[in-house]
Amino acid sequence: MTTVAELTRELVSISSHEDETAAGDFIEKWLREETAGEVVRDDVGNVIARRGTGETSLALVGHHDVVAPAASQTNDEGEYIVEERDGRLYGRGTADMKGSVAAAMLAFRDADPSCELVFASFVGEETGGTGATHAINEGFAPDFAIVGEGSTNYSKPGVTDVVVAHKGGRGSTITVEGEPSHASEPSAGVNAIYRATEAIDLIRDLPRPHVEVFGEELSGTAVVTQIHDGGNASNVIPGQCTLTVDERTVPGERVDLSQVENIDGVEWTVNYDGPPMRCDDEAFAETVLAAAVDAQDGEPELTTKPHVTDAGRLVGAGVTCVVCGASEPGEAHTDTESANLEVLERCYRIYRGTAERL
């Protein structure tokens, strides 16, 4: 029987940072040959499979696209390098998140589910959640979902936790207009940089929202991360300036950045808004936690996560979600990305255990 390590190695070796087709082909073929599920490949390349019956449905959700690999993660032919050493599998996508996808594939095959069991691997998660958005628009709405993004070593080293809430990400541009003049006569113009500093001071002082989910606190942030287009010569009062703001949002709350528009010449534009996630069913979270306890020697906890995942999009569609997966803080998107092989097996047990006890 195929192990999680073997399946992860095969999946990670397939390039999927520019085109997810080959990875999707592999997942679809494997599911058709190895499971009793009804497998569908949708118009954008998502792979979705279903098996079992019951009054409720549980989805094991992942994505098979990855960010571009570093030069050290490919060979001279551009193929992904996958290496095993010291109990870990190294390569682009091992942590984020083909390892958890492989664990979910095997759990989908092996579980004796007490519900309808669904497997879903989406495309485009790294580029704005296009695959999940398409699936949702086409009616994908299981009752419950475990999204296999990272939750390992969050509460303490050596455990795989259950994430019940995570932050969203909203990116904004603040455009500031002034009136240029010669720098020798500053009063003849309006300094756009000075107006921008007013906006920065206001953003710094705006209240940050806080929410609590099953006793776990999540706090929002908003920071100015870039300032550009602020003047074009050393002897000219700048007539324009642009700020970039990175905001980490929490469920149901936002920093009120619209207040910057109370400053003359200032316009605020939202460029993207990745939704936060909050589990709305403590009993489901505890069910997954119980499976996590049974799957490992440590003491996993309900916890929170700072990163945006497809769980936020699913929650927006009415799906009750938690996040639980192999990736550890500091692994995803790195030049030395890796996943612990023991943890991959642990995730398989958590996913299978949840499906059999829900």
Image: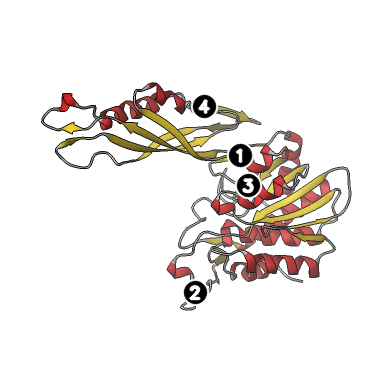
Tell me which label, 4 or 2, sits earlier in the chain.
Answer: 2
| Pick the front one: 192 or 244 | 192
Q: Position of residue 35 (x, y in %)?
A: 81, 65
Quadrant where the N terminus sits is bottom right
Tell me the residue that label 1 is attached to: 303
Q: Which mark is residue 78?
A: 2
Tell me the residue that label 4 is attached to: 209
Tell me which label, 3 or 4, sits earlier in the chain.
Answer: 4
Give SS at disc 4.
Answer: loop
Tell me which label, 2 or 3, sits earlier in the chain.
Answer: 2
Give SS at disc 2.
Answer: loop
Tell me which label, 1 or 4, sits earlier in the chain.
Answer: 4
| Pick the front one: 294 or 121 | 121
Distance from disc 2 to disc 3, alpha carbons, whole Å, reads 29 Å
Labels 3 and 4 touching (C-beta < 8 A): no
Q: Position of residue 238 (x, y in %)?
A: 23, 35
Pair 1/3: label in front: 3
Q: What's under tag 4, amino acid-wise? A: Pro
Distance from disc 4 to disc 2, alpha carbons, whole Å, reads 45 Å
Labels 1 and 4 touching (C-beta < 8 A): no
Distance from disc 1 to disc 4, alpha carbons, whole Å, reads 18 Å
Give SS at disc 3.
Answer: helix
The answer to which image quadrant residue 20 occupies is bottom right
Give SS at disc 1.
Answer: strand
Taking the view exactly as shown, the residue that stands out farthest to the bottom is 77
Distance from disc 1 to disc 3, alpha carbons, whole Å, reads 17 Å
Q: Position of residue 120 (x, y in %)?
A: 72, 55
Q: Which mark is residue 310?
A: 3
- Residue at 45 percent across and 62 percent down: it is 335
- Residue at 56 percent across and 28 percent down: it is 253
- Number of marks: 4
Taking the view exactly as shown, the residue that stands out farthest to the left is 184
